[in-house]
Amino acid sequence: MRGDDVAVGPFGGSPIEPGPPAPAGNGSERRSSWRSWPGTASPTVWFAFGFVALLIVGAALADWIPGLANPGIQYGKFHASPTLDMNGLFGMDPIGRSIFARCIYGARVSLTIAVFATLIGMLIGVSLGMLAGYYRGFTERVVDTYANALASLPPLLVLLALVAAVGASLGTMTVALGILGSGMYARVTKGAVISHAGREYILAARALGASDVRIMVQELLPNLVPAFTSIVPPAMAGLIIVEGSLSFLGYGIPPPAPSWGGMIASTSDVMNQFPYLLLGPMLAIVLTVYSLNTIGDYMSARINVREGQL
Amino acid sequence: MTVVSETSGRLLEVENLSCEFRSEAGIARVLHGVNLTLDKGMTLGVVGESGSGKSMLMKSILGIAPRTAKVSGRVVFDGVDLSTMQAGERRKFLGRRIGIVFQNPMTSLNPVVRVGRQIEEAGRFHFGWSKAEGRRIAIDLMADVGLPDPEECYTQYPHQFSGGMKQRIMIATALACKPDLLIADEATTALDVTVQKNILDLLANIQQERRMSMILVTHNLGIVAGRTDDTAVMYGGRIVERGPTEALFTDPRHRYTEALIGAIPRTDQPAHTELRVIPGRPPELLRPIPGCPFAPRCSVAEARCSESTPPVAYGADERHTFVCYVPVGTPNAAAAAAAGASTEVN
Amino acid sequence: MDSQPAGSAPLTGQAPTEGYLRDESLLKVRDLHVTFRRGHRTMEAVAGISFDVARGETLGLVGESGCGKTTTGRAILRLLPKENSGMTGSILFEGTDLGLIPNSAMRQVRRRLQMIFQDPLSSFNPRRKVWDIVGEGLVIQGVKKKEIAERVDAALNDVGMSRTMVEGRRPHQFSGGQCQRLAIARALALGPDLIVCDEPVASLDVSVQAQVINLLQEIRERKNLALIFISHDLAVVRNVSDRVAVMYMGKIVEVGEADKVYARPAHPYSRTLLEAVPMPDASIKIKPTGVASEMPSPSSPPSGCRFRTRCPRAQQICTDVEPQLRQMPQGQFAACHFPHSEPAPGVRSSPSVERSGASF
């Protein structure tokens, strides 16, 4: 057949796989790596991904990292200043424990909460939002009320009250944060479902005989991904900050379990003398939050660029 | 502003106009050395499918191509060479001399501004009309374009009008500065066929009354057939054939023009008439090929068609030009297999 | 339902409304009404139409926006939104009334009654693979995996594509014309008897349009498919249809064999429509007519004949009495008190047609 067999986007967008070589090499310019097209993996994005990956691996396999100090027992001198070896990188805390090691173990708490609370929130929120957006009417009103009620609760205060009442544990905090976050997911889901439910491919699915459930799961759910890739990472970052704040206030996971906020709290009274003690936990929080937000921006730009070719 | 030549009836002269885009995937050439002339009082039809570059041609002439586009070539309007002007100066000059009506009236009108104000805006900017003057002129214009009860319409918002009426408002907006040239860029594509006819009739009447020139840009050959003096057919960013409309339709020379005419279903043909099919699909802008852009889809293309650009040739009328090595009427056009149907995948 | 129209003296003493309806038809629509509710207002999108489609026949449903043709297509397939629409009348497909059967039974019927939509790209889920989409209908019907693959393969071949072209790809990787072929394949995979095509070529370029039209024709012939071809483009409808129904403001104003309707349109609206179609023939110079009126708002249609506000022939009776469909001397049925009988406005075959039709 004459002509190109390569399938390209309707606007002549970049082919998904290489086609026959361009007969006239008229300098089709490759993408310049310094041009900041949204969705290009610049060095900051690489760093963000790398950092988060390393953090996850490190936190999971902390027990097996060779040479890592025990975060619970004294390792060096009290308030020791940072040295250039692994365990001494951020110095020692007021009872001589390796801050670096405690940061690594502390990541477990932060990441567990970030990931599982998000999962719980999404599970509840997406289900409710899907039903609200698809069926509208009464269901929509109920879910709206639910989301609005949650949105009107200041998360930190609610958690403080919860901890005061029931005591802090990883489980309670994760579930509580999950439920608090479900309102946002419900609202975002509902919006995305409403915007997609009127489209022709949904109608086409109904014409083929698909049931409501099938449409919700097979057709609508995958289309929620773009909306979510841009809000999930920053939401997770927010959770880390909330956990850190709680621990700092003393309402987080009780010591001696290491947590970043708790570490900041425990050095607060000697901050003036040994300011470098804050380095470890603060760096941990800042870098994690920054990385998650960067990942969020990058993913949403990537998805939008692709959808932009539709 | 440099006056280049005596105007002598020629309103618009476009010379070697090219337009390139940088995108993530490379350089896309939307226009390749387009040449175009338009005399005063004449109606020109510009016909092309998607990707032919017809809209970008209009935008490049007006200087409103997107900022990421690189436009080169010469545009002379009423004796004035526009390429010597700064962008802002050029827009100001043309904004008053050329009116343009776009395809989608829904997005062309500002939804939160009253319609009357949108019509008079340009006039007040260019001529400094007072509020009262602007209002009077706007109402007169709305009556001219056939809007019922213009006094009432003046204070209404775009969403209160139907598609056809919105387009009439757009036309009124375009006419406010008494332009010398009116460009209708797919202005009736989104409208129902009876509304389309009304709008096209309206444009023709207005053109007569005000002695304007007009360019009708469309993908619909039927629209240009009865309403234009000259027609230019575009494909792959080039004008492949141009000439008096009647000559083009009765004696098409470029293979694309001929194929296009044959591919259109007609109301006077019997049911189940097999349509002339053009295999393949419109060219990719990112990988332009040398030679004629239509060659990959042409049933009689020869080797040289893909190697070099054909020279300009003339039809019976000297104003009828085309660029084709194997035009219609060439004897022994070898690979002339199917003028018939094919279900080949495009 | 078989009552004689009251109050209108049939001017030509011809057969009553039901004369154009046939008993032996694949699909029979009788007195269909569809209303939409928005807030407190209701709007009647389809105001009582009846027609039928025989096996292997193509019915063109033609009209401008707001006439109710798309709504009719969707009503037939029971795709109207449940919350804010209401439908009365009967839709009989092979004897079964589609309005009365439960969802599970409807699913069975959908095997034989399919639809193609206007915008090829948006009728596909952008996040799913095309191969899965084309086979979706079969999965829903519970067909075995192996058979699904075979039938999807066959359907793709029918539309001139193949598994290799399609494997692993998503909708945005295909052009408009290819997407429309895939949409046809999706409908064909189920082996339907009737396909409702809702403006299938409206968003395609002319050169691609011809490909898809020819493809539809060829498939229709081969499989003896019935088609309801909904479009605003009279030229396209002329090309594909055996019979034609012209709709205006929710009513059928003219219906009959396409040849007859196009040759001698009886209803003034049909003539207006035909006159307005731009013909690619440069020998007719169009003389611009004066300012014409626009269609009235569909939520409050004119009394009597709905077209009377734009009709040059309107008289008092047109305001008082709504005309019913009656047989015209030319053969087709039209709902008008003062129908036309002369040939269509416009042109006979011109030199340009012959030239472009010939092969070189």
Image: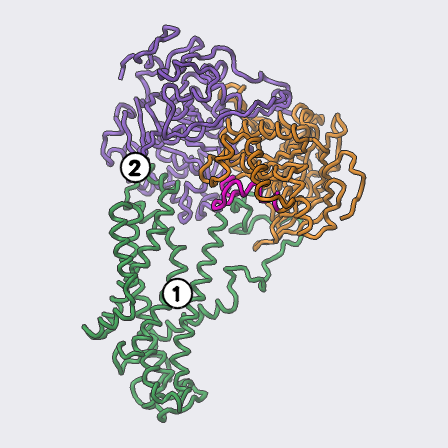
Q: Report the Cα–Cα distance between label 1 and label 2.
A: 42 Å
Q: Amino acid at mark 2?
A: His
Which residue does the numbered mark 1 point to in the structure image? A234
Nearer to the camera, A67 or A104: A104
Mark 2: few/some/many CA within 10 Å (<14, 14-19, 20+): few
Q: Secondary structure at mark 2?
A: loop
Does the magenta stretch mainly form a helix, a strand or a loop? helix
Q: Position of residue A90 (x, y in %)?
A: 41, 85
Residue at (34, 53) in percent of width and height: A189
Say whether residue C31 is visible.
yes
Q: Does residue A267 lie above or below B121 as drawn?
A: below
Q: Is residue B108 magenta?
A: yes
Q: Secondary structure at mark 1?
A: helix
| Mark 1 or 2, closer to the camera | 2
Q: What residue sits 64% from the left and 42% below the top? A: B57
Letter of the chain shown green in the rendering:
A
Which of the two residues, A237 or A61, is positioned nearer the viewer here? A237
Residue A78 badge: none
Q: Verify whether residue B265 appears in magenta.
A: no
Residue projecting furthest to the bottom: A77
Location of residue B76 (image quadrant): top right
Asked whether the viewer can see residue B31, the reply is no
Amino acid type assigned to the residue bearing label 1 in the image = Pro
- In the rendered image, the residue lying farthest to the top is C13
Q: Which region is colored magenta?
A: B105-124
Q: Which chain is orange?
A: B
**Which label sits on residue C40?**
2
Chain to which the residue tagged by mark 2 belongs: C
